[in-house]
Image (cartoon, rainbow, N blue to C red):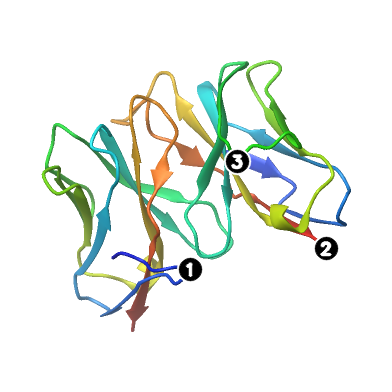
Amino acid sequence: DTGVSQDPRHKITKRGQNVTFRCDPISEHNRLYWYRQTLGQGPEFLTYFQNEAQLEKSRLLSDRFSAERPKGSFSTLEIQRTEQGDSAMYLCASSPKYPRDGASTDTQYFGPGTRLTVL
Amino acid sequence: GESVGLHLPTLSVQEGDNSIINCAYSNSASDYFIWYKQESGKGPQFIIDIRSNMDKRQGQRVTVLLNKTVKHLSLQIAATQPGDSAVYFCAETRSQGNLIFGKGTKLSVKP
């Protein structure tokens, strides 16, 4: 499978614990995005990287959230001191630098997401 | 296709009929639009896109129409099949920025 992958698919944690999610983008995609989706809503932007540089962060990304993409390939999203309000689906997407087959550099391809439940 | 609160608008169609899903976008500066399909428990799946210099684009069984005057986007699905049942989101962006998603419409296809 050459799509975006995310790990774990599901995470249940207790309030106050730290969690870390991983995203592996499609090979050679230079941009990587993180979104959060709650039930019944569309995904909301959190942050994005171009190669290893974090270029934009949403106001949704509180101080408890940190994201990295150290080598410009995979990325991690860490949430410290989790709260019940952090329960959501965390989605990762990537977009190509050199699109193929009529695709665009703006087209974002999503992974399956990590479902976080904070008890 | 607009939603109120947390309730997704629902479109119910008979198998074989055509479906039209509507979306209003917010930013007149957006220049790229995408339709995604999302099945329960899965990530959004790319369906079709359109740039702001176009008003129509066709794919396999799907057509996207863009009306920039009223900031409206629609997705037409021809000969709807049970496998098309999902939530459909429109998304807008500008120059490789982050996507801004609409509220979503749940499509139910009756066999």
* Chain ID, mark 3: A
Q: Is residue A99 depicted above or below B73 in this figure?
A: above
Q: Are marks 3 and 2 on the same chain?
A: yes
Relative to residue A111, is residue A78 drawn left or right? right
* Chain ID, mark 2: A
- Residue at the spot x=34%, y=77% of the render? B109
Expressed as whole percent of the image width and height from the top left, the position of residue B56 reads: 13, 45
Measured Cα–Cα span from mark 3 to mark 1: 19 Å
Residue located beneath label 3 in the image: A60
Quadrant in which the N terminus of chain B appears: bottom left
Q: Quadrant of residue A32?
A: top right
Residue located beneath label 2 in the image: A119
Q: Are marks 3 and 1 on the same chain?
A: no
Identify the amino acid type marked 3: Leu
- Residue at the spot x=14%, y=49% of the render? B70
Of the pair A3 and B36, the residue shown nearer to us: B36
* Chain ID, mark 1: B
Expressed as whole percent of the image width and height from the top left, the position of residue B71 reads: 19, 47
- Crowding at dot 1, Cα within 10 Å, few <14 / some 14-19 / many 20+, comes out as few
Q: Quadrant of residue B62?
A: bottom left
Residue located beneath label 1 in the image: B6
Residue A5, visible in the rendered structure:
yes
Q: Under tag 1, what secondary structure?
A: loop
